[in-house]
Structure formats: C-alpha cells, structure tokens
Image (cartoon, helix red, strand yellow):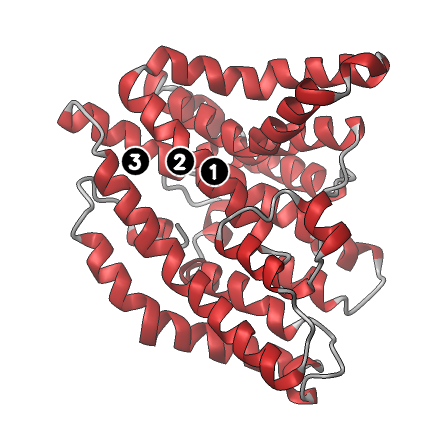
Amino acid sequence: MVVLSHLGLSENPLYKAVANGHLGVLIFFVISGFLIITLCIKEKVVTKGVSLKKFYIRRILRIFPVAYLYLVAIITINLIYKLDIHYINLLGAGLYLMDFSSYFRKHYFSWYTGHYWSLAVEEQFYLIVPFILKNQFVVYLSLILFIIFALPVIISLQYFYPPLNTGLIYAFTHFMIKFQAIAVGCLFSVIIFKYPGIKNTLSQSKLIGNIIAIFLILFIHYDDLFTLDNMYAGMLISFLTGYIIVSNISQSKDLVYKLLNSRILEIIGVLSYSIYIWQQLFTSKDTRLPGFMVVFPYNIICIIAVSCLSYYCYESFFLKLKSKYTKIKTDARILAPL
C-alpha cells in the first residue's frame, strides 16, 4: 500500500483506496503491536518474566542494520547527486526523532528520510512499554486503555475548548496519540490471552465479517493529517484490523484466510521491512537521479532487486544472530517483518 501510494500510478478511485500509504502504516502498527506484545506475554507466561535485555537486542538486530545501511547509502548518493539533504535531517532519522514531523517538515524536510517517522513511533513505544509490561501488568493495561479510549476524549475537549490545546497538555496528548494503533494491537494480544475462546467467537461467520471489515478499512477516509475525523477513523480502522487478525489466527478454508496465507503475501511479509526502507529512494521522482532509479517500471525492478539483496545478503546475517536471543518460538513467516 505504501509503495503503490508513493508510485502514484493512477487517479482511479479504487487504486487510490488501495494505494493509501498512511493507511498501510496504520495497519502495520496494529500488526506490530499485536505480534510483539503477544511474544512478550508468551515469554512472561512461560518463563515467569520478560528479558528486556534480549528484547532490545532483538529489536536492534532487526531494525538497526538496514535502517542505518540505508542512511549510509543516502549520504553517499547525496554527495554524488547533490540532493541537498541536510545533516540535521539525517540525524533526525538516525536518532528516531522523525515523528516530530512539524519541525523537520518546516525546516529540514527531505523525501528520502520521511518514512523514518514510523520507525521513530515504533521504537519510542517499544522503548517503554515492554518495561512496564514486565513489571506492572495492570499499569501496562491501564496505559494501553488510556491511549486508546481516554486520549481521544481529552483531545476532543481540547478541540472544542482551545485554552486546553496549548503548552504541555497539547504536546503530551498529540505525542501520545501517535501510539494509538500500536496500542490497539497490544489490546487484542491481551484479549486473546485473557479470553482465548474469543477466537472461536470471532471466527463464526468471519468470511462476511472480514469482507465488510476490509471494505470499511479501504473506504473510510484516513490520512496522517491530525484532525478529529482522522483520529476516530484511525481508531475504527485499528479495531477492524485487529478483528481481521484475531479471526484469522486459527486455520480455516475460507477465501480470506487463504488470501492472507498465500505464497505471494508470505514473500512480501518476509521482505516487507526491506521493501519499506528502500522504496523511498526509488519513488522519489527526483530528476537529479538516474532515470532507471525513479522512472516506472524500472524503479519497481530496483525496489525488488535491492530489497532482496538487502534481506538475503545483509539482513539475514543479523537475523541469525537475533534468533539466538529468542526464547519463545513462533511461525517465522509471521514474525519476519518484525
């Protein structure tokens, strides 16, 4: 969805509905929160604790190598083709601060590092939440519920009563709301453990339910501009995504399950992080770069080739190291993007 959005190949309404990069990132946030917190809860149940050291080593080995390799590549290309990428922008990406987009867009905007905002949101969330989960489950659950349900109410009050929409209160609420979709994924992981029978309940008539959910997800208006409409649309889409995830955990023979477990989506899942990192370079439409890098369909070939090289010739080394720090094993196809 992100790649199609950045390619911008058509103005057809159906294409625009599917090619919604903001929506794609929102869906990934839900998936990420569900899978990563599920692993943490499994580890807590099985081993009576969560190894934060191993958790953060796994995150570093999965996220950092290709993220910084890309930045090295961008610095090199910037020197060769004079792309005018400011070093402050590169520092913001390297330090996972790009979610403070109003600052970087206003002063040091660059297309080439714009996608690092989502990495920043994830790493800031996972820097704190697993620690809380390990030590105080009630506090963890309260924080998740606060982000999902209380924050929108507070922000709505701020919207209608401007004196509340300034200073530290504004900064706090508008920083925390970025974590809402991840928090929804976390909430679904808790629900599955607390109420395992809910999988069977949601699986009943799930084919029609999934089709309706997918239709709503695609055609509810959503973008990353902060408005009340977007905030509540994002909440609804996050819950619909969580429903699709949970209702398709158990194996079944229906069309949606087969589609989500198809070979092509499995391959895309394995390569998804690599694709997400590298596609930004080849969808830039920057005329200073060679045509084969940014002109369709050659840029698609570049995205596929570079992502495969990145994953199989570089990232796989770090993934092997990562597996040594994994206590709880699960389906590698599911965890590959994370």
- Between residue 5 and residue 285, name the one nearer to us: 285
Helix, strand or loop at disc 3?
helix
Vertical placement of residue 25 versus 42, above or below = below
Work out how far the residue at label 2 is from the one at label 1, CA to CA, in angstroms: 5 Å
Point out which mark residue 127 bears.
Answer: 2
Residue 320 lies, in percent from the top left, at: 21, 61
Q: Quick one: label 3, few (<14), some, or many (20+) residues within 10 Å?
A: many
- Name the N-terminal-most of marks 3 and 1: 3
Residue 316 lies, in percent from the top left, at: 29, 67
Query: Looking at the image, which residue is at 70% across and 54% down?
Result: 18
Q: As drawn, is 296 to the left or to the right of 116?
A: right
Looking at the rendered image, the disc whose residue lies closer to the viewer, 3 or 1, is: 1
Q: Which residue is mark 1?
A: 124
Q: Which residue is mark 3?
A: 39
- Between residue 283 and residue 296, name the one nearer to us: 283
Amino acid carrying label 1: it is: Gln
Labelled pair 2, 3 in contact (Cβ < 8 Å): no
Q: Please state, as top left, top right, bottom left or bottom right, where the N terminus lies in the image.
A: bottom right
Amino acid carrying label 2: it is: Leu
Work out how far the residue at label 2 is from the one at label 3, CA to CA, in angstroms: 16 Å
Query: Looking at the image, which residue is at 60% across and 49% down?
Result: 98
Q: As drawn, is 111 to the left or to the right of 26?
A: right
Residue 124 lies, in percent from the top left, at: 47, 38
Vertical placement of residue 127 versus 71, above or below = above
* Res. 150 visible in picture: yes
